[in-house]
Image (cartoon, coloured by chain):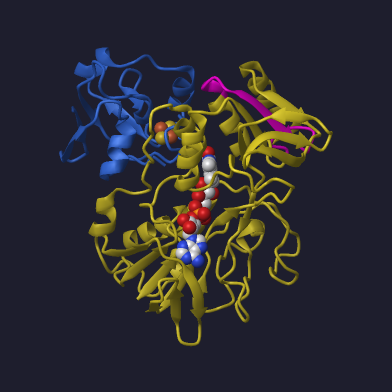
Chain colours: A blue, B yellow
Amino acid sequence: MTKISFHHAGGAVDVLDVDPGTSIMRAAVTNGVAGIVGECGGQAMCATCHVYVRPEYLADLPAISDDEEEMLDCTADPRDAARSRLGCQVILGNGLEDLEVDVPGSQV
Amino acid sequence: MDNIVGNGQAGIQLVDSLRTEGYTGRITVIGEEAHFPYQRPPLSKDYMSDAKTPLPLPLRAERFFAGNDVDSRLGVRVTAVDRARRTATLDDGSRLVYSKLVLATGAANRELSVPGSGLAGIHGLRTLSDAEAVHARLAVARSVVVIGAGFIGLEFAAAARQRGLDVTVLEFADRPMGRALSPAMSGYFAGAHERMGVQLRFGEGIASFEGRDGHVCSAVSTAGHSYPADLVLVGIGVIPRTERPRQPGCRWTTGSSWMAPCAPRTRTSSPLGTAPATPAAMPPPAPGWSQCRTPRIRPAIWPGPSWEAARATPSCPGSGPSRAR
Ligand SMILES: Cc1cc2nc3c(=O)[nH]c(=O)nc-3n(C[C@H](O)[C@H](O)[C@H](O)COP(=O)(O)OP(=O)(O)OC[C@H]3O[C@@H](n4cnc5c(N)ncnc54)[C@H](O)[C@@H]3O)c2cc1C
Ligand code: FES
């Protein structure tokens, strides 16, 4: 199992244990984490799964693809040059066993 | 009690919007599919390109339904609505009384009726059950023929090609996704698929299928060419599931299939019935059905149902900021 923590504004945290191979977006949508929508179903086409990855985990993340790069410019809340990622493009497991992200204030 | 018929994108978004806006009445959702409400879009994309057994993506988490006090009746179909008595009859024989009924019955795949279309190995793709059957078939198939170069046909063609299968797409028109895209965009996508090794055959419709032992083995096009096929995916559009509102006395004021340019209302002429969305790409279903003078084509894609459902909420009784979530 891999662990992911979603930090919300105001301090609430959702901590989930999910199977390796699960994306941040799928983990959130399946478990009803508020503030992650996933409208396109994980196609890097909607940017409603935007998260800010906490700095201590940035080095463990996969590279940003061209599609993700383009979509990150379309997030509802401002893109953070270092921390913004699309939750559907980051898969847990395989070296990313533990992750903490901040949930943006809006996705649409 | 309210009942919402159809547990697709529109039905579930409506539940969400009703509760968000403070509606406190009982909500029952009736869905013909036995599956927990799931997202359709991935079914023609990663669901197919992934050789492992993929998981569907839920429309909402399970706790959404419990937490919002929603009674989900899955695996049952509404077969009749009696507007005078305000009852809906289900195919399990039971009958529900409603105060307000919302029809969010979506669309069904248009079916092919050419010779041989009943052979095994010929599939449509709309439901999770369809996707499970096609996914299982992909594991053993070698040659795929896709009928129709629309969104779903091309997405599926790309996924099958990614998995190393021979893929031929037959399209009656002269370019892909012609209903939705400009010629330039069609050209872009045609090129992208051809570079992947997908064979695109424009100006060729499907004439018939040939089979061996009850299973499809080739597809014969209207140009007379025969293409080997042990899996056929039919993606020729959808028709709205309007069986219910089409009853006598219940007429749509703005058929949502082409309502966009009309008044932004989604109510049926019945004071009891509201139809958030029936996405469809088709001519008007019947003369006099819609008050819109000009039939407009509405792309059968996702944002439509969500927005229509969100717009349908204020007319529901009891909605309002009375309940904090
Ligand atoms: C494979 C696939 C890929 C897609 N990809 C995309 C995409 O990438 N982007 C995009 O924007 N859109 C996409 N779409 C379209 C999108 O999924 C639809 O527009 C959307 O699902 C429509 O939602 P809906 O709630 O109106 O209808 P539906 O999803 O059709 O839901 C209606 C539900 O009502 C049920 N029902 C119908 N009649 C009855 C009855 N009498 N009693 C009980 N239940 C009933 C049906 O079983 C169904 O579950 C895709 C569709 C498919 C099939
Ligand atoms: S779910 Fe749409 S971009 Fe991630």
Left or right placement of residue B64 versus residue B285 in this view: left
Nearer to us in this view, B291 or B200: B200
Check the picture and name the quadrant holding the N terminus of chain B.
bottom left
Please check the rendered image and state whether residue A55 is part of the magenta-colored stretch, yes or no: no
User: Of all residues shown, which one is farthest toward the right?
Assistant: B223
Q: Residue at x 30, y 30 (%)?
A: A22
Expressed as whole percent of the image width and height from the top left, the position of residue B324 reads 24, 62
Left or right placement of residue B282 versus residue A107 in this view: right
Q: Is residue A81 above or below residue B136?
A: above
Expressed as whole percent of the image width and height from the top left, the position of residue B272 reads 49, 78
Nearer to us in this view, B69 or B111: B111
Residue A21 sits in quarter: top left
Expressed as whole percent of the image width and height from the top left, the position of residue A54 reads 22, 23
Residue A75 sits in quarter: top left
On the question of residue B220 being in view, the answer is: yes
Check the picture and name the quadrant holding the C terminus of chain B.
bottom left
Q: Residue at x 42, y 71 (%)?
A: B316
User: Of all residues shown, which one is farthest toward the front?
Assistant: B213
Q: Residue at x 18, y 41 (%)?
A: A10
Q: Give the total of numbered labels.
A: 0
Q: Is residue B149 above or below residue B251?
A: above
Q: Residue at x 39, y 28 (%)?
A: B52
On the question of residue B302 being in view, the answer is: no
In the rendered structure, which segment of residues is drawn in magenta? B161-178
User: Of all residues shown, which one is farthest toward the bottom?
Assistant: B84
Expressed as whole percent of the image width and height from the top left, the position of residue B293 reads 75, 64
